[in-house]
Image (tube, grey):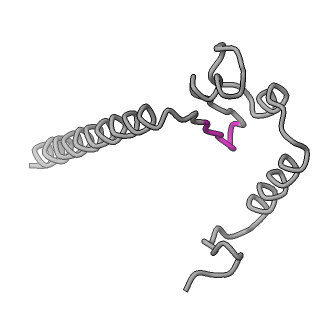
Amino acid sequence: MRTALFLFAGGVAVWLLGREIARLREAEARYSLVVAAADAGIWDWDVLTDEMFLSERARHLYGLQPSATVRRHTEWRELVAFHPRRLGRGADRAERFFSRDERRPTTASGGAPR
């Protein structure tokens, strides 16, 4: 009886995992279509590993060579020229965000949502 229950639970887990993988693939396909249609450059920064991904279009918009797509965030900042004021504001915002103990949503003015 125990073995049958174990096999049944394992089968259910595999079935659920398969459903989630299919949903993720569908969402990724929709996302790819939107990005292609918008002709936008996409970047993604993994703050835990400090790795930053730039799509081919983003590299083109920033005037970068189509070499490595994933690099350290600090490397990308050296390759792309940002206006000093914009760079400072972005760094300040990131620092404020990561220094908070709790992650609570805020409104544009910084207050708590109602």
69 shown above or below 84: above
| Magenta stretch holds residue 51 | no
Q: Residue 81: horizontal and vertical position, in percent?
A: 84, 32
Vertical placement of 7 versus 71: above or below? below
Q: Residue furthest bottom?
A: 114
The image shows residue 38 at horizontal and vertical percentages of: 46, 38
Could you tell me which quadrant the C terminus lies in? Answer: bottom right
Stretch in magenta: 43-49
In the visual, does 57 lie left or right of 10?
right
What residue lies at 37% left-to-right and 34% top-to-bottom? Answer: 33
Residue 98 in the image, given as x and y percentages of width and height: 75, 58
Kindly identify the residue that appears in the image at 64 percent across and 40 percent down: 46
Write down the quadrant of residue 82 in the picture. Answer: top right
Q: Is residue 73 above or below residue 101?
A: above
Q: Residue at x 66, y 28 (%)?
A: 61
The outermost residue toward the right is 84
**Residue 50 position (above or below residue 61):** below
